[in-house]
Amino acid sequence: EQVDVAEEKSRNEWLSWIQGKNIPIHVFVYTAGIVSADGKGKFLHKYPYEEIFKIFTVNTLAMIHMTEEFKNSFFIPQKEGRIITVASLAGIIRDVGAGIYDASKAAVISYMRTLGKEIDGLNKIKQCDIKSNCIAPGMVASAMTVHLNKQETEAEKQLRKSQLDRFGQNDFS
């Protein structure tokens, strides 16, 4: 079953579909992310409001919505669960040309830090074993970054930020 995380109705239908399966869920992983409508970064002043809203919806707001749903509908009643989100190194190390993406991923990191503190208290009060973590990888070769291969200087600049001295590989496409 697929979900369009940009659309609240699609997210709600998908969540209802999962709840209807009446099976325990142990792990929720949120990996969705877009840099822009056309897949290429741009200067802040060139983003129309609708595009900013979509980037934040996909990268941040949908993640918060779905994380809260999984936490409240599955993990608290089950008294256990794992929440994992994928942000980006761009949420920590900002760069020119993808500021809205960077800001949306910084918001993911901040939310997950706060969620971790809240879950710690929840675990103590309700005697649960819920854990959360946020992964912030560097550049990953994917459909979202394929255009950077054509801009060798940009790709090299991103590669210098990687401690591995290579791009991550996308095993799922």
Image (tube, helix red, strand yellow):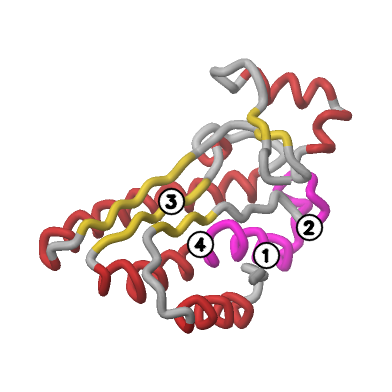
- Circle 4 sits on which residue? 63
Disc 2 marks which amino acid? Answer: Ala
**Disc sitting over residue 37 in the figure:** 2
Which stretch appears magenta?
37-62
Assign a secondary structure to mark 4: helix
Instruction: Reply above or below: 104 against 165.
Output: below
Say above or below: 78 vs 165. Answer: below
Distance from label 3 to label 4 (Cα)?
A: 10 Å
Q: Secondary structure at mark 2?
A: loop
Q: Residue at x 40, y 66 (%)?
A: 25
Of the numbered discs 3 and 4, the one sitting upstream in the chain is 4
Viewer can see residue 41:
no
Callout 3 secondary element: strand
Query: Percent x, y for residue 36?
Result: 74, 53
Residue bearing mark 3: 84
Q: CA distance from mark 2 to mark 4?
A: 18 Å
Q: Tags 2 and 1 in contact by the CB under 8 Å rule? A: yes
- Quadrant including the N terminus: bottom right
Which label's residue is closer to the chain start, 1 or 3? 1
Residue assigned mark 1: 54
